[in-house]
Amino acid sequence: MGRVYNFSAGPAVLPEEVLKEAAEEMLDYKGTGMSVMEMSHRSKAYEEIIQTAEKDIRDLMNIPDNYKVLFLQGGASQQFAMIPMNLMKNRKADYIITGQWAKKAWQEAQIYGEAKAIASSADKTFSYIPDCSDLPIDDDADYVYICENNTIYGTKFKTLPNTKGKTLVADVSSCFLSEPVDVTKYGVIYGGVQKNVGPAGVVIVIIREDLITEDTLPGTPTMLKYKIHADNNSLYNTPPAYGIYICGKVFKWLKKMGGLEAIQKRNIEKAQILYDFLDSSKMFHGTVRKEDRSLMNVPFVTGNEELDAKFVKEAKAAGFENLKGHRTVGGMRASIYNAMPIEGVKALVEFMKKFEAENQ
């Protein structure tokens, strides 16, 4: 069997040329006689891999010099604790709840201080982004937290919240490197890489230097201090070396594609094909308020659970993998990250048209 169209929310599709290149280098990376998987993280060859990866993501995102780029482990979920441990100086933070991951981050932060939910879209199954232009932000809040793109529910902040001068912390796991971004608007911008950037096991944290201090909450483990990792260029302990190497290849691929402006254009075009069909279909419809739709994750339903299940089953047989929606939404979800080719989206829409005609 050839490669399928993989619509998984993560771990997700990677660019084919990146996988091929990694395969070619699997046994012998650039004449070292060994795989990157076998290489000391203290070696010259590896030092070059991690430094080049950092330089390339800085170029892609236009990251200012007063921000550190950290390649860490523990996924985005470990950041749910690491952020309050390092940033909650007044033991207060404000959270905007737009889905399961923002909610989990907020619950975790409650262990360390007073974490307030200052806005939420839970009332409509997280199908929209609440108005964040004038929120009740605490004068003593250490930061305001958002999950910028909600993988499960298919929503995206198109306008960042007005934080009234407070530090903005954003989990961008599922929209990482999908569009240009003004890093200076954030204190911390971070994401697990297994959706848009690389294999599971790496989380990238971009953090403004003034937020990296010795002054962490009492009891913070050494491994969960940003300063330790920043001072050691992400090499304090053995990093997820192979994962970072693949991320580095994806950064090169993105540069080759023309950078984040070019990839955004491509992503808009891809999403448009699917949303246009959903808006015109008699059988399928999207679940998200139009102005809040994500370019990366597209949930949709038929309104009939049996029909949904039939669709997922037949789609799988036709080579469209991982289209089942999250259990909290039901239905289907197509994740169409950077590496999903436009042909995949077109083929999916053709399949949906055929399914609709056969199941009137």
Image: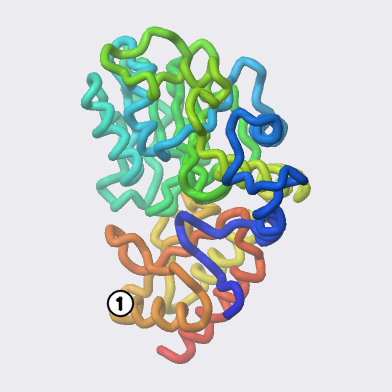
Residue furthest front in the image: 33
Percent from the top left, x then y, of residue 283? 42, 78
- Judged from the image, the secondary structure of the residue bearing numbered disc 1 is loop
Residue under the image location 70 percent in, 30 percent down? 44
Drawn side of residue 290 relative to residue 219, left or right: right
Drawn side of residue 326 relative to residue 171, left or right: left
Residue furthest bottom in the image: 358
Query: Which quadrant of the rendered structure holds the N terminus?
Result: bottom right
Q: Residues within 10 Å of mark 1 (few under 14, many from 20)?
A: few
Residue under the image location 51 percent in, 30 percent down? 205
In this view of the protein, can residue 172 be seen by the observer? no
- Residue 142 picture quarter: top left
Percent from the top left, x then y, of residue 204? 52, 34
Residue under the image location 55 percent in, 74 percent down? 348
Check the image and report above or below for 303 versus 165.
below
Mark 1 lies on residue: 304
Percent from the top left, x then y, of residue 127? 36, 52
Name the amino acid, label 1. Answer: Asn
- Residue 338 picture quarter: bottom right
Count of picture labels: 1
Residue under the image location 55 percent in, 44 percent down? 243
Percent from the top left, x then y, of residue 170? 46, 32
In this view of the protein, can residue 112 be seen by the observer? yes
- Residue 76 picture quarter: top left
